[in-house]
Amino acid sequence: MDNHEEKHQRRIRYKGTHPKTYQEKYKELQPQKYADTVEKVLQKGSTPAGMHRSICVDEILEFLQITPGQIGLDATLGYGGHTLEMLKCLDFKGHLYAVDVDPIELPRTQARLESLGYGPEILTIRQMNFSSINQIIAESEPLNFILADLGVSSMQIDNPERGFTFKAEGPLDLRLNPKKGVSAATRLKTISPDELESVLRENSDEPNAKAIARAIVSEIKKGTAIDTTTQLQQIIKNTLKSIPGSNSNEAIKKACQRCFQALRIDVNNEFDVLYKFLDKLPSALAPGGRVAILSFHSGEDRLVKKSFQSLFRDGVYREIADEPIRASAEERSNNGRARSAKLRWAVKA
């Protein structure tokens, strides 16, 4: 018998008729092998594990008006859904740059796009933050179009090992690049109650920021290690149980979402990164160049709106969106993560 013969691996067993945890959804994590399973999940309006459904694709393409021969940038590669659609518009003429900070998902996305025929002759992918957009311009002509999707990808949120979700046990990390900076767990060990309250209030508009911040810091001072997502969730839950009007299951769920979002924004310096990106945008665009930014948080949307309005008044942009474009009713119904999306755009003078 050949000693190198690959051993048969038994499929993952789970209770009940449907998988619940990320690891149990092994069929969804292998879309090439189990395409029928993935299609069933999509038809139900859900996102298969390990995948991401791009939002406002039609609206983005309608505005960007990409034509073959142009040069553009996808500033947030992610799963590559928007990237793929922009590449189709280029029709192998011109060039698309794409960047992302995530060292785990980037090579997977690059491999998927290469398998579809999009190699370095049409697509350049870099692991970098979009705040360094000037590095792309240093080796390229000014860009005809730029897209930035500020949302966290579903495959990052759903994987408990990344620490983005409170729905499953995982390390309290929340970093888009787990190789840089400090995790949320480490950040909480030294933060003061006032600073944490500010983080929760400014980054997610959490109405119970003061009570939650003091409860978290109090537990840490007692020697409690808050190293996992479920530990943090439990502290938030225990805190809100004693606050009238905030103690329902739905209210607690919303508070957990806001707190995790606030910490994610903090550990990744997302607002600072966005400031730098918005500041460098005009110099990256060719005259008549178009930029579209998709945001999912009121704080991000305010920054984009104010930047576009200010530069419009200064004559840098000749046209900007009067109001944000929202995902269609059909898309919001089919994809719950599209409900908070706001798309703003600008055209350089």
Image (spheres, helix red, strand yellow):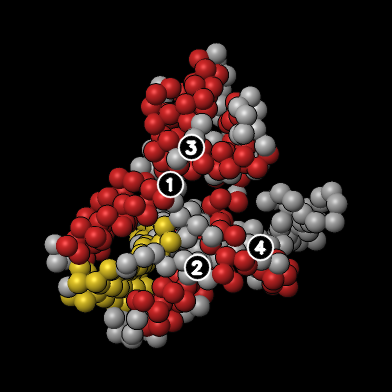
As measured in the structure, the alpha-carbon distance from the residue carrying label 2 to the one carrying label 3 is: 25 Å
- Number of the front mark, 1 or 3: 3
* Left-right relation of 293 to 242: left
Residue pictured at 45% horizontal, 42% vertical: 204
Disc nearer the start of the sequence (1/3): 1
Q: Amino acid at mark 1?
A: Asn
Q: Amino acid at mark 4?
A: Ser
Evaluate whether residue 293 shows in this view: yes
As measured in the structure, the alpha-carbon distance from the residue carrying label 2 to the one carrying label 4 is: 16 Å
The circle on residue 327 is 2
> Could you tell me how many numbered marks the image carries?
4
Q: Position of residue 166 (x, y in %)?
A: 61, 40
Disc 1 is placed on an element classified as: loop
Q: Position of residue 29 (x, y in %)?
A: 65, 60
Residue pictured at 34% horizontal, 73% vertical: 96
Viewer-closest of 272 and 114 = 272
As measured in the structure, the alpha-carbon distance from the residue carrying label 1 to the one carrying label 4 is: 26 Å
The circle on residue 206 is 3
Name above or below for residue 10 compared with residue 73: above
As measured in the structure, the alpha-carbon distance from the residue carrying label 1 to the one carrying label 3 is: 25 Å
Name above or below for residue 38 compared with residue 258: below
Q: Quadrant of residue 52?
A: bottom right
Residues at circles 2 and 3 in contact by the CB criterion of under 8 Å: no
- Number of the front mark, 1 or 4: 4
Within 10 Å of the Cα at label 1, are there few (<14), some (14-19), or many (20+) other Cα atoms? many
The circle on residue 46 is 4
Disc nearer the start of the sequence (1/4): 4
Q: Position of residue 307 (x, y in %)?
A: 25, 56
